[in-house]
Amino acid sequence: MRIPVFVSCPTALSPTQEAQRKVILDMLDQMNLEPRALGRSDYPTDLPLREVMVIARHCAGGVILGFNQFTATAGTSKPGTDREATVSTPTMFPTPWNHLEAGILFSLKLPLLVFREEGVSGGVFDHGVTDVFVHPMPEPTGREHELKEVFLKWRGRVGAVYFA
């Protein structure tokens, strides 16, 4: 029997991002975990945000995959405040669904594992926002065994939730 875990990930990915996602999914498979995601394994019959909550309630953990989904090359951050700044280098943003889904999983007190593509920041991807470490997105290099330690520790917490 595989333990269900929620995977927050955009559906539109570049080939490189898809390869990185596959590294994560392969690791979940090795850990006997079943990835669940809106628009991939589960399809909404109701409002999408409500469906995320329904899926998440049946999961014992969550994985947040912060892939770049929008790049801003110019703009103003925090306009009209004393912290206003002009964007002078490309700034990368994940899907807003990562933040919504992470918030739902966090509120359900589920163990989280958070990964972010280099350059992605803000919200759940900022260090210290949640009680979990934000990991760099793994590359498909054949060195996935290094990633296994991270998954084993998280998998222990997921199992404790599932079998409680």
Image: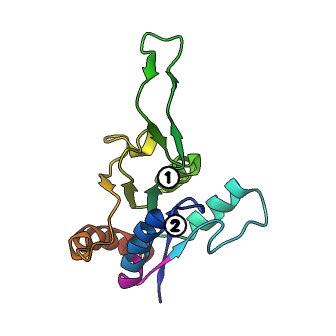
Q: Amino acid at mark 2?
A: Phe
Using residue 54 as the reference point, say whether residue 116 is left or right of it.
left
**Image height of 143 relative to 104, above or below:** below
**Label 1 with label 2: CB-CB less than 8 Å:** no
Q: Which of the pair 152/140 is nearer the observer? A: 140
Q: Amino acid at mark 1?
A: Ala
Which residue, given by chain and number where applicable, does mark 1 sit on? 102
**Image height of 157 relative to 127, above or below:** below
**Residue 126 coordinates in the image, percent (x, y):** 37, 41
Look at the image and say whether residue 29 sits in the magenta stretch. Answer: yes
Check disc 1 and report its element: helix, strand or loop: helix
Q: Which of the 4 image quarters holds residue 163?
A: bottom left
Q: Which of the 4 image quarters holds residue 84?
A: top left
Disc number placed over residue 6 in the picture, else none: 2
Disc 1 or 2, which lies upstream in sequence? 2
Look at the image and say whether residue 19 sits in the magenta stretch. Answer: no
Q: Residue at x 45, y 58 (%)?
A: 64
**Residue 42 coordinates in the image, percent (x, y):** 66, 72
Using residue 128 as the reference point, say whether residue 64 is left or right of it.
right
